[in-house]
Amino acid sequence: MSLLSASLLGIDFASPLMNASGVCCRYNEELDAMLASDAGSLITKSCTLLPREGNPEPRYTATALGSINSMGLPNEGYEYYLDYAVKHDYAKKPLFMSVAGLSLEDNMAMLTAIREAKLPAIVELNLSCPNVPGKPQIAYDFEAMESMLEAASRVWAQPFGVKMPPYFDIAHFDEAAAILNRHPLVKFITCINSIGNALVIDIERESVVIKPKDGFGGIGGDYVLPTALANVNAFFRRCPDKQVIGCGGVKSGAEVFMHLLAGASLVQVGTALQEEGCGIFARLNAELAEILQRKGYRSLEEVRGKLRTL
Ligand SMILES: O=C1NC(=O)NC(C(=O)O)N1
């Protein structure tokens, strides 16, 4: 066991770091770059039943404080990622598959096909894409989320995880956690997806910066770090039988350490990975190791959830 060893669903990871679904994971070449990187694992682009072009461009813009995107789930269709998962060498590093069907039926069809392939791939069910016009985020509709989790638990019939949107109200943390706790097969919770439907304005052009939805898109990066940490900690506190994966605002070892303190078992990198490339994982591992050593920690276990309150 090295200093950066992590564990999820009883599976060992050499590093807690991985990509956030959507970044460096649409094509085989990107997934292979993640495999060759110092990330402890990798996750595929959220897939739909059929391939999708996604929203019109420009649909991603980096900003001084992070990024805004309205990709619209562009992906090669679930069979492409299932094919990658069949060929993947799980002894090298664990692989996650992100599933984001446009309907409950589509999700069940994909989960059935993936289940029948009998792979060690870990499924992260995306309940929180904010960018498909006309498709509300499932996890903001508690009844829809309950129905989706009931169906997914029945069809998938083994442990899986969910990608959650950020919540901003304690009552919503309570309600969402209560729903998740009613589904014991939901063994991990990834917090957070982008903060949906934000608006970035360029004053020189007096314009929005992305084309879809009149410029409204999900934001990531520095903008979302405190909200991401709050959601990680809220679900860590409320779901003692589940693990949490942190996502949001990670750009150095410091933010990785914050997510671990808040309760994260693994940590995903989105905007910073998009901007820096896969070399970021070697840097983040080194920076995290330096913080742990400086503070006298010998494992991530000793840090997880140890956030002090005043
Ligand atoms: O779940 C998602 N979150 C995002 O921020 N963007 C992508 C997308 O638009 O495909 N999906």
Image (cartoon, grey):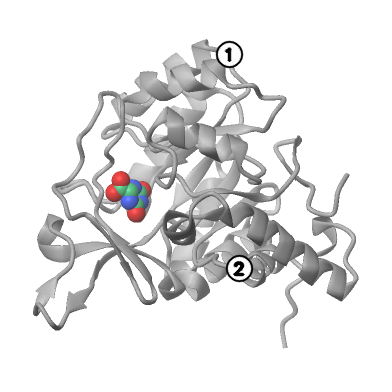
Rendered location of residue 144, percent (x, y): 33, 43
Q: What is the three-letter code of the residue carrying label 2?
A: Ser
Above-or-below relation of 201 to 33: below
Mark carried by residue 118 = 1
Q: Residue at x 61, y 69 (%)?
A: 255
Q: What is the three-letter code of the residue carrying label 1?
A: Lys
Q: Residue at x 61, y 43 (%)?
A: 37
Rendered location of residue 141, percent (x, y): 32, 52
Judged from this view, the residue extending furthest toward the bottom is: 310
**Camera sees residue 264:** no
Which quadrant holds residue 222? bottom left
Q: Residue at x 67, y 33 (%)?
A: 93
Give the position of the N terminus as an image quadrant: top right
Q: With 284 as the anchor, is 75 left or right in this view? A: left
Of labels 1 and 2, earlier in sequence is: 1
Judged from this view, the residue extending furthest toward the top is: 116
Q: With 205 as the anchor, is 48 left or right in this view? A: right
- Secondary structure at badge 2 equals loop
Is residue 244 or residue 67 the one in the foreground?
Answer: 67
Rendered location of residue 146, percent (x, y): 41, 42
Mark 2: few/some/many CA within 10 Å (<14, 14-19, 20+): some
Question: Total label count?
Answer: 2
- Which residue corresponds to mark 2? 252
Rendered location of residue 306, percent (x, y): 77, 69
Is label 1's Cβ within 8 Å of ligand 1? no
**Camera sees residue 246:** yes
Above-or-below relation of 164 to 294: above
